Amino acid sequence: MTALLMFLRMSWPYLLTAAAGAFISHEIDNIPYSRLQAARSADQTRWAQEEAQRQKAATEALQAQIKARLTTEANNSAVIENLQNANAQIAADRDGTLTRVRRLEQLLVLASHQTAGRGGVSQAGSGSGATSTGDTPGPTRAEELLVAASGECEQTANQLNALIAEIRPQL
């Protein structure tokens, strides 16, 4: 008996732990199936809700990116359209200006021929001083104004250049 008591005295903590483990294991095995099923279904529901929230957040982020890109593309297309319209307007203005410049050059050439013809007629002292040759029509009032405006622009440009030349040394 002393051997048994000595054995129990040394192994009683281990025996007690084994008995508690067996009891707990027995209790876990005896948990009703419905309680386990309910706990599992609650976990699955929670996991499904978390997954749905992650999916919703990802979808919202993707939709925000798509919306931002569409807005950017719309703005870019509007800017491109405005630039194309401005480019077309500039081209039209350039073409109109070139046409007017060519016409003005023709008028200046015509005016220089007419002033040379007047000088020649008055120096010779003969004739009535007519300026038109008959084969080219004379300039209209608008064309005369353009010639005058061209001369005035040239004078203004010369005055501006003189002013710049005067101010530049002072800087």
Image (spheres, rainbow, N blue to C red):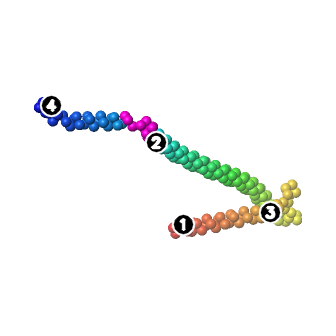
Q: Quadrant of residue 96?
A: bottom right
Please state if 113 lies on the left or on the right of 52 as rendered: right
Instruction: Examine the rendering and report whether any part of residue 105 can be seen.
Output: no
Tell me the number on the disc at residue 142: 3
Within 10 Å of the Cα at label 3, are there few (<14), some (14-19), or many (20+) other Cα atoms? Answer: few
Residue named by callout 2:
42
Which segment did they paint magenta? 29-39
Label 2 or label 4, whichever comes before in sequence order = 4
Residue named by callout 1:
168
Q: Secondary structure at mark 3?
A: helix
User: Amino acid under label 4?
Assistant: Leu
Please state if 16 lies on the left or on the right of 69 as rendered: left
Please state if 125 lies on the left or on the right of 10 as rendered: right
Q: Residue at x 85, y 64 (%)?
A: 129
Within 10 Å of the Cα at label 2, are there few (<14), some (14-19), or many (20+) other Cα atoms? Answer: few
Q: Secondary structure at mark 2?
A: helix
Residue 58: x percent and y percent?
Answer: 51, 44
Q: Residue at x 49, y 44 (%)?
A: 49
Tell me the number on the disc at residue 4: 4
Q: Residue at x 82, y 60 (%)?
A: 139
User: Amino acid under label 2?
Assistant: Ala
Which label sits in the foreground, 1 or 4? Answer: 4
